[in-house]
Image: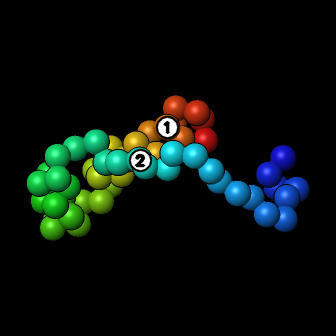
């Protein structure tokens, strides 16, 4: 597994986004409501779907 490696290289399309309009993201940032933004983070959603 990856734990036995000295070096791990990630490659591929890492162009994930937050699935909500920019203005909504900015408003949530002003409110320090980062948890709501993270709920719409495509990378985190993919990790959860994969059981990670």
Give the spatial CA distance, label 2 vs label 1. Answer: 10 Å
Tell me the element at label 1.
helix
- Above or below for 31 versus 15: below
Left or right: residue 29 compared with residue 34: left
Tell me the element at label 2.
loop
Q: Which mark is on residue 12?
A: none
Near mark 1 (Cα within 10 A), the count class, few <14, some 14-19 or many ≥20, is few
Residue 49 or residue 7, whichever sits in front:
7
Measured from the top left, where is residue 31 in percent x and y?
16, 65
Q: Can I make out residue 44 in this image?
A: no
Near mark 2 (Cα within 10 A), the count class, few <14, some 14-19 or many ≥20, is few
- Above or below for 34 versus 14: below
Where is the C terminus found, in terms of image quarters? Answer: top right
Residue 6 falls in image quadrant: bottom right
Residue 30 or residue 18, whichever sits in front:
18
Taking the view exactly as shown, the residue that stands out farthest to the right is 4
Q: Residue at x 79, y 63 (%)?
A: 7
Measured from the top left, where is residue 39 in percent x and y?
35, 45
Q: Are marks 2 and 1 in contact (CB under 8 Å)?
A: yes
Left or right: residue 7 compared with residue 14: right
Q: Residue at x 58, y 46 (%)?
A: 12
Residue 45 or residue 35, whichever sits in front:
45
Q: Give the number of the mark in front: 2 or 1.
A: 2
Q: Earlier in the sequence, mark 2 or mark 1?
A: 2
Q: Can I make out residue 52 in this image?
A: yes
Left or right: residue 42 compared with residue 52: left
Q: Residue at x 62, y 50 (%)?
A: 11
Q: Which residue is mark 1?
A: 46
Q: Residue at x 74, y 58 (%)?
A: 8
Q: Which residue is mark 2?
A: 16
Measured from the top left, where is residue 14 in percent x and y?
49, 50
- Above or below for 29 versus 52: below
């Amino acid at each position: 597994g990856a734990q036995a490696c000295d070096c791990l290289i990630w490659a591929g399309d890492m162009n994930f986004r937050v699935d909500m309009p920019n203005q909504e993201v900015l408003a949530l940032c002003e409110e320090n409501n980062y948890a709501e933004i993270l709920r719409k983070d495509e990378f985190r959603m993919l990790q959860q779907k994969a059981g990670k």
